[in-house]
Image (tube, grey):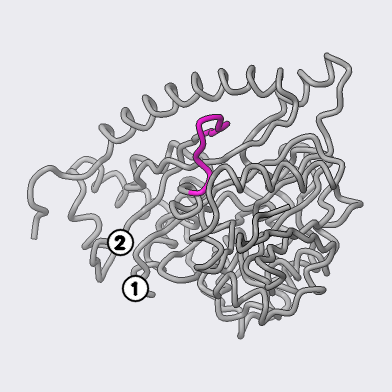
Amino acid sequence: MPDSGTPELKIRTVQFIGDISPDHWHQCSGTDSPFLRHEFLLALEQSGCTTAATGWRPAHLLFYLNDQLAGVAPAYLKTHSMGEYVFDWAWADAYQRHGMNYYPKLLIAIPFTPCQGPRLLFSPQLREWMTPERLHQALASVTEELGGHSWHLLFPDSGDQQLLGTRDELHRIGCQFHWYNRGYTTFDDFLATLTSRKRKSIRRERRQVADQGITFRHFSGKDMPDHILQAFYVFYQATYLKRGQRPYLNSEFFHELRARLPDQLQIIMAVKDDQLIAGALFLAGGDTLYGRYWGCLEEFDHLHFETCYYQGIELAIKQALTRFDAGAQGEHKLVRGFEPVITHSWHGILHPGFREAIARFTREEAEHVMAYARDAENALPYRTTAPEK
């Protein structure tokens, strides 16, 4: 029992985001990030994308301090590791080889979304009271209560990272590539900051797309026709089917997204001979544009780069957004002006033997990732002198 006068923390879980009112959720989460909004998480659940049947049983965390709601966190009890973008398949295999269960695990994350942001949506009072030791103990306790064997918190922002670092931490890092708008008013302003060779290369790629007779049309969520949403879903499916996989998201999700977050949603369609040939979906929130999904049925030279990156950069400039997060992976983004960014995840492994082994792995992995990020930084295409006028 806590000492007299010491705040008492309790954690409750709910299996449907709709059991939490949007007002209560947004009081903790704010509304800047489209992925943390109640509407986004509800769209995933209402469409059947995040359910027990798909291996994403919602287990959203509600934090109470002295019986007052003081924080929430999007969480799921997972029976696989798909759709996370922080890969722990080798850990699961090691458990299996030793005759032990790795799943279920408690995942604190945004499904299918490798974008950094707050995950522990705490009130100032709870954040001030919380320490890394208290947090790790609380997450271990709720994991055991749910029948899980580990907890995993993916892509937190710097504020959450301060609450997660402990001496016994299992901390992984990764590397993504983001584009930054340094006061550009046109795409040419951005190009002027690049070396001559890279600037000419990008212009050549864009010209080759145009020379194939390809143009682009933009559709915002509020005015997006059904046939555009349906065509985009066909393109999105093709991205997965080409790799022999089933898509994570269904058509209903995208209709829910349009209905619930129209002001954040944008689809850019590539058109050739009056036919839609490819599409990319973007969400905007706060100061950031997020490039999330893409697809095409037929390959065209440089079409992916133009649709997903150059059109996205132009959209970010037009909307005066300061950052463009085009998703995970993609070393090819580097030569197009996207800069290396270190991402983070924390992992609570309840089995002491596996925790020690995984800790060694994460330390070694971090050294390789940091070396890779340093090399990427040195390979950026930006000029070291003042840009040409």
Residue 189 image point, x, y percent: 21, 62
Q: Which corner quadrant of the image does residue 63 belong to?
A: bottom right
Indicate whether 65 appears above or below 97: below
Side of 267 where 383 appears, left or right:
left
Indicate whether 380 appears above or below 119: above
Crowd tier of the residue under label 1, counting other residues whose Cα lies within 10 Å: few below 14, some 14–19, many 20 or above: some
The residue most toward the front is: 4
Quadrant location of the C terminus in the rendered image: bottom left
User: In the rendered structure, which amino acid carries the disc numbered 2?
Assistant: Asn
Identify the residue at horizontal 55%, vertical 69% (top origin): 123
Which residue does the numbered mark 2 point to in the structure image?
Answer: 181
Q: Is residue 160 magenta?
A: no
Q: Nearer the viewer, residue 281 or 339?
A: 339
* Cβ atoms under marks 1 and 2 closer than 8 Å: yes
Residue 71 image point, x, y percent: 63, 66
Q: Is residue 168 magenta?
A: yes
Crowd tier of the residue under label 2, counting other residues whose Cα lies within 10 Å: few below 14, some 14–19, many 20 or above: some
Q: Main SS type for the magenta part?
A: loop
Q: Nearer the viewer, residue 168 or 172?
A: 168
User: In the rendered structure, which amino acid carries the disc numbered 1?
Assistant: Ala
Q: Earlier in the sequence, mark 1 or mark 2?
A: 2
Side of 250 where 216 appears, left or right:
left
The residues tagged by marks 1 and 2 sit, at their Cα atoms, a distance apart of 8 Å
Identify the residue at horizontal 63%, vertical 42% (top origin): 136
Side of 282 where 249 appears, left or right:
right
Numbered range of the magenta stretch: 163-172
* Secondary structure type for disc 1: loop
Which residue does the numbered mark 1 point to in the structure image?
Answer: 320
Identify the residue at horizontal 84%, vertical 53% (top origin): 57
Q: Nearer the viewer, residue 287 or 108?
A: 108
